[in-house]
Amino acid sequence: MCGILAVLGVTENSQARRSRIIELSRRLRHRGPDWSGLHYHQDCYLAHQRLAIVDPTSGDQPLYNEDKTVVVTVNGEIYNHKELRKKLQSHQFRTGSDCEVIAHLYEEYGEDFVDMLDGMFSFVLLDTRDNSFIAARDAIGITPLYIGWGLDGSIWFASEMKALSDDCERFLSFLPGHIYSSKSGALRRWYNPPWYSEQIPSAPYEPLVLRKAFEKAVVKRLMTDVPFGVLLSGGLDSSLVASVASRYMIDSEAACQWGSQLHTFCIGLKGSPDLRAAREVADYLRTRHHEFHFTVQEGIDALEEVIYHIETYDVTTIRASTPMFLMSRKIKSLGVKMVLSGEGSDEIFGGYLYFHKAPNKEELHKETCAKIKALHLYDCLRANKATSAWGVEARVPFLDKEFINIAMGIDPEWKMVRPDLGRIEKWILRNAFDDEQHPYLPKHILYRQKEQFSDGVGYSWIDGLKDHANQQVTDAMLANASFVYPENTPTTKEGYHYRTIFERFFPKNAARSTVPGGPSVACSTAKAVEWDAAWSKNLDPSGRAALGVHVASYEETKAVADASAINGTPEK
């Protein structure tokens, strides 16, 4: 995963300005430690920090068309670049980079080529012939992108907020599935799938169609010229990614370079649910498994660095980002630069435990649509920035455009949790891979209850974070939170603590506005809190807040603690 910075329409073109842009681009070097590039033309600068995944030897950026009149700086991967090159046979390519097709597609099709790209990407393209430019972000927002405006009339784009927050008067998170054109001076949506309107679909559920679509999504993401692996928590989603990758690994080009045994990675507190489950899946799939441990204190010690890198004060995101951040450092130390991960499945299939309370298929479908549209603010942001902090790229096959269209076109009645029919959350996905003759996973893993990553690494992780926050934030501080932080006011000491750290790094109003707010239980939206009145009294993003649903809910955990206290025995 690379880092991009583009500054267009500056009024001062001195050496000092160039040096400043280079300095700001260096703030993104963790994303791309392999090489740096900068293109300057008149009043425009395009900078790039490269993480070399495809064509490491010649794919340095910025990239150009034949006569270098079109310049592009890209963060991402274009999985169908070979197919696109076949449509561009009259063009001469300089590199083997998958991203070079963007410059040539622009030459051939103008601004209307973005929907042809199959991949994850954020890019800025400059046409030096008329000094016009476009910027675009992938359909779901897997790769991060921010847009900002300087007092001198300049417009800025950057992979992370830290590269533009000091020099822009105002900045926003660039909307996924959108393109900005300097010719119109506005954003427009290029991604218009059928599900986006939130109309209730009616397509029948065909398990084999769903399975094949996901297998295709995984296989295309095996495109790499560097060592890679799979993040394996032992839950359904990551286990399916590992199973499919392992099954098709032997036929991939990557196997020719790196061998046919898949590497898998897991992190957790010692004895955590994820470690046990991941080890079992790895043994079943015969992967080369790497198990990492961390302590609650090590996680707490990393909090400030985590918040600096992921650029949010959202409680759920920080809880889950910290172990992922620590794991990514270990993964990079092994020489691995790319991983597959399981983000997106819960949003598409209604996998979070609060979906057990969905009153009907219409409400469920609208909630899944809302969750997918917000992924760039939560799980995509976490997966990308927590790994990129150490120069590791995360790819997410569940967020493949074609797979999403198929999965979101199915009648949502099939996604409803129906205990009377033996259907738990994500039953349609589990059933699609329930193959008796050629099993993908052991049955009890295939039907394991949903664990949020921040829970699965060890329940004491969240409890430890809360205890730490209680020591840092007084009752008086929380009572006055609405005066100190009138926007997105923190309602817990943990939230207040994270907000304080965030504000130290990003003190501007524009920065705090990039983070969403609102009540949540077990990762729900504010709307879904209405599905069960009891949840409004237990607003916590942990899966254990799903009272009466999670097998280790807070209610039951509290009962065990109370019994232990009465009996004079310590908690285990």
Image: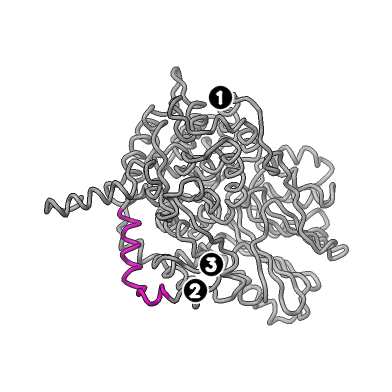
Q: Is residue 336 magenta?
A: no
Q: CA distance from mark 2 to mark 3?
A: 9 Å
- In primary-sequence order, the first of circles 3 and 1 is 1
Q: Which residue reaches farthest right? A: 130
Given this view, does label 2 or label 3 mark the residue nearer the observer? Answer: 2
CB of mark 3 within 8 Å of CB of mark 1? no
The amino acid type, in three-letter code, at marker 2 is: Ser
Query: Furthest residue to the left?
Result: 568
Q: Is 115 displayed left or right of 361 in the figure?
A: right
Circle 2 SS class: helix
The residue tagged 2 is: 482
Q: Nearer the viewer, mark 3 or mark 1?
A: 3
Q: Secondary structure at mark 1?
A: helix
- Residue indicated by mark 1: 207
Residue 494 is at least partly visible in this image: yes
The structure residue drawn at horizontal position 46% and vertical position 44%, both measured from the top left corner, is 354
Q: Give the camera-side residue of 422 and 170.
A: 422
Tell me the residue at 63%/71% (across/down). 164
Residue segment shown in magenta: 460-479
Q: Are marks 2 and 3 in contact (CB under 8 Å)?
A: no
Query: What residue is disc 3 on?
Result: 488
207 relative to 385, above or below: above
| Sooner in the amino-acid sequence: mark 2 or mark 3 | 2
- Pointer 1 or 2: first along the chain: 1
Q: Percent from the top left, x then y, of residue 441?
A: 41, 29
Residue type, mark 1 in image = Pro
Residue with the most extreme top position: 437
Q: Main secondary structure of the magenta part?
A: helix
